[in-house]
Image: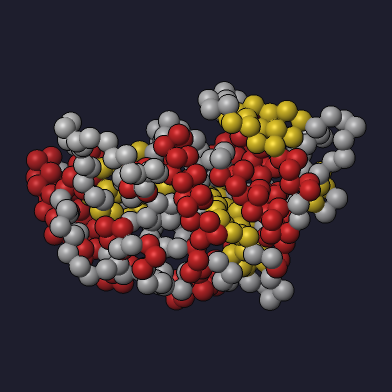
Amino acid sequence: MGIRTMSWSEWMELDESFTFHQRIRSFRVRQCGETVLRVLPPLSGAEAAKELLYELAEYLPRRYPSVFSVSRLPAVSSIPSIGGIPLAWDGQMPIRIIEVVETGIKYDLGVLESMSGVEMGEAALRIVNGLMQDDIAIMLEGSDGKYYFQGGLICVPGFWRMRDKIGMPLDEIHGDVPQFREKLQLSMNRFFKRLPLDKPVIRNNYSIQVVKPLTVPDASDEPRLDVEEETLSDIDPEELSWSESLNGPEDDFAHGRGHGTRDIPHLSPSTLRLRSERQTLRRLPRSGAIVFGIRTYQFKVEELAQERGVAGRLASAVRSWPDDVAFYKGRRRYRDVLLAYLDECGKRDGITGPTEVLLEDSEGRWQGMHEI
């Protein structure tokens, strides 16, 4: 599974692209509704969503004190809790208001106290959406011992849709992942059941994506007065939220992977991206839910290839994929253009390398990205 131990300071990463991500995420929640933000009624998914919000409200101002500010409930107030355990850290009163300093947007956590069930859980996830760049999946253990996908905030999945997977147990969610049933199913189920409160974990994966070329408006074009709202293409030209170039329209997507078969007319080195997911897992202390965080990054292949040695290693990695992994990642759609370009850059460098691709993450560390 490529899992490694995660320090608490790594749980949620924010960077200079926060505002860009927020525009996409708020647009997706507003336009797509329950296809990107949903809590299911059984198994206390709503309480887990509320607990997650309070955990983030405590964590984020400590980790990013210049980005967030908070105010707490007065000592005479009733204390929000789950299972009798207050929703606060270090014996303090729970947070009432959390503010994003740069924008001045304030979120009142107290509104949840007049709600219950799915309404409360989805309201909590709407606030969560305004605080972070990660997608979130909430997994809860059922009476059969399996973990079920009971709540989600999935705004930028790229290659899958929450509507196809929510409510499923872990083994069905990953049923189309190559070698999952043979090599990972039993170990992953055991891992979820045994994940301790104090030992969160992290992993990375990568894939190749094609995006539409950036269009620059002609200076002579007059503004469209009949267009009242921005489109997803306006807000997300890099197809972070949905890889339409590879998958076609999101609403027409056939459940599963393998991508489409039609030619991509705009396929070129300039439209190729390396897409990487930083995935975190931690257990919440009150509900026992496991929170799966998914932070997505994109890198232009042309820019990566300028780094000496990277082109050769990336080409080697893409060639090394087994057939089932290559199908899952849609390699046949972009292979010829990608590999021809990387080989040309590799010859320029005079370097070939192992099958592992090395990329520098946002903290300046070098990570090996070699998982599905």
Q: Please report the residue visible at 25 percent of the width from the left and 53 percent of the height from the top.
A: 210
Name the quarter where the C terminus is drawn: bottom left
13 left or right, relative to 361: right
**Which picture quadrant has residue 46?**
bottom right
164 relative to 6, above or below: below
- Reply above or below: 64 against 10: above
Please, which colouring scheme is shown? secondary structure
Please state which of residues 353 and 128 is positioned toward the viewer in this rendering.
128
State whether residue 139 appears in this view: no
Image-based side of 130 in relation to 271, left or right: right
Q: Furthest residue to the front?
A: 226
Q: Residue furthest right?
A: 76
Quarter of image, res 188: bottom right
Q: Is residue 103 visible to us here?
A: yes
Q: Is residue 77 above or below residue 328?
A: above
Q: Is residue 252 left or right of residue 81?
A: left
Q: Which residue shows up at 17% across the image and 64% down it?
A: 263
Q: Which sits in the foreground, 3 or 258?
A: 258
Q: Position of residue 368 (x, y in %)?
A: 36, 48
Number of numbered callouts drawn: 0
Residue at the spot 61% in from the left edge and 49% down from the top edge:
125
Q: Up-down: is 166 above or below 144?
A: above
Q: Position of residue 318 (x, y in %)?
A: 24, 58
Whole-percent x, y for residue 90 in the image? 78, 34
Q: Is residue 235 left or right of residue 166?
A: left
What's the residue at 30%, 67% (across, down)? 259
